[in-house]
Image: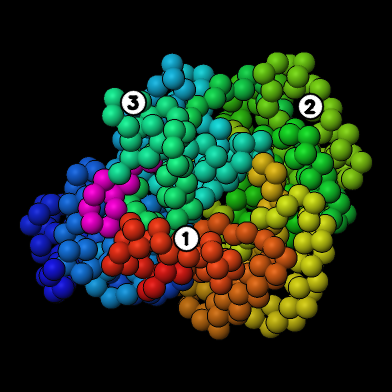
Amino acid sequence: MNTDTSDIAARLQAELGADCVLSDAASLAFYANDLFWQPGIAPVAIVVPASGEQAAKAIALATSSGCAVVPRGGGMSYTKGYLPARAGSVVIDSRRLNRIIEVNAADMYVTAEAGCTWAEVNAALEGTGLRTPYWGPLSGVNATVGGALSQNSAFFGSALNGTVAESVLGVTVVLADGAVAITGSGGRLNAKPFTREGGPDLTGLFLGDNGAFGFKLAATIRLIPQPACIGFQSFGFPSIQAMGAAQVEMARARLVAEGFGIDRTKAEHSASVNRISEGLQILGNVASAGRTLLSGVKDAIGVAVAGTGFLKAHAYTLHLVVERETDAELARAMGLVREIGQRHGTEIDNAVPKVMRSRPFSPVLGMLGRDGERWVPIHAVFPLSEAKKVLDANDAYFASRRDFMQQHGIVYSVMTMTTGNEFFLEPAFYWMDEITPLHATSLGEDVVRPWRDRPANPAARNAVVDLRQGTQALYASLGGVSWQVARDYPFRDLLRAGTLGLLDAVKQAVDPRGLMNPGGLGFGG
């Protein structure tokens, strides 16, 4: 076994071609940052394979040389998911693995390479009358299939259909030694990738693994008919407890396709929410979206001129999409949603969910605040029955930290969702800090130019670290479960002894030298 990593970039270039390997100083520095954590440890090389064969060769060459390999998707992580944990690491970037391998309408599945964005997956399904049950995050213009599977993900379709993990039939992965494995029925001789069943569920090992068990090349995801009828509703509430109670009732009745609740602070500070007031741009997109979104141009004009002022009239607002197969079914479901919403709050203008659906994969403005503030969230999911207790504890915790946040100029906001039978809670923090190259690349220089010269604010950033760690500890004490574990959320310390032993045995089997994304899931970095 070779353990000399000094010339690994040159050897990768010789094996794969210079166009597949980056080793210039600017690229190495860029790949040492995520949306929150910076600067980290720079890799020695970045491989951007154009095929599964190239990815397998790169991983085999890197690990046989003693280099750790670090999978990277769309770059939307804020939990050190794709940051090297040790010197001498090679990042494997999936961006060029972006082919749609197969759309099988007859057997109801789509197979896509891991570097496909969710926007690309949905574009490939246009005209089929089909979609995946979970069909992407709000960051779907950048976020990839592989990243979503590695970190778990929820938004579009998730209130009814759960997270992305519940829609996956099988994955193709490169293990640490370069071997390629296929899970689900696609891993059998002479079988299509049509089912996840038929023996132990090996697919589940690679979902939510944060790339610690293997590098994803592709995934097969089941398809469902595109719902024929769509409705939109929004409500205002005096407290987050009232909003949470309404969300829990709706989740138990399986009424909502997707929805989210926000506080007044998020309505004021989030660039994503404030895009509603983009006037003519929104008007054009919503008006052209057809009768399933709006009844006509008059409604579109109302969306365009409404802005976000109506959101600030309520302490908390909830925004919902309802899907059904017929107009009668939709009317009944909308009536039940209205009954629940009005029992706990007040019905308001439904512009927000309409606009979200009119441009589901628009630029990821939410990674900065309205005035260019840095942004980072923290989250956990809980049983539906625990929602009120969790919300009360969350309120008490942040009330106790109010002076600390004011001292450091940190603004706190909160978002809630339901994903299947889970209650999702996501506080977020805004503060003034430097704009990184990752923000500029993701949003465009034109967007970030007004704030490009803003100085670094490590004191406030470290204060946010403290707040996030305190929130993580609180949620763990309440029995919460977090996705996107990476190198950020507590994980190993929360596992029962037998469960931890099984996890370690799996890691030993697929990555005996600990070179696949070390540090991920708390495995040795």
Q: Residue 199: within the magenta?
A: no
Compared with 165, 198 (above or below) is above
If the image is split into quadrants, where does the C terminus sit? bottom left
Q: Residue at x 19, y 48 (%)?
A: 54
The quadrant where residue 473 appears? bottom right
Residue marked by disc 3: 191
Q: Is residue 24 visible?
A: no
Residue marked by disc 2: 333
**In the rendering, which numbered label is found on residue 502?**
1
For the residue pair 224 and 404, the one nearer the viewer reads as 224
The quadrant where residue 324 appears? top right
Point out residue 24 in the picture as x, y percentages from the top left corner. Answer: 20, 66
Point out residue 216 in the picture as x, y percentages from the top left corner. Answer: 35, 48
Query: How many C-alpha atoms fall within 10 Å of the one at disc 3: few (<14), some, or many (≥20)?
Result: few
Residue 71 relative to residue 52: left or right: right
Q: Residue at x 12, y 70 (%)?
A: 2
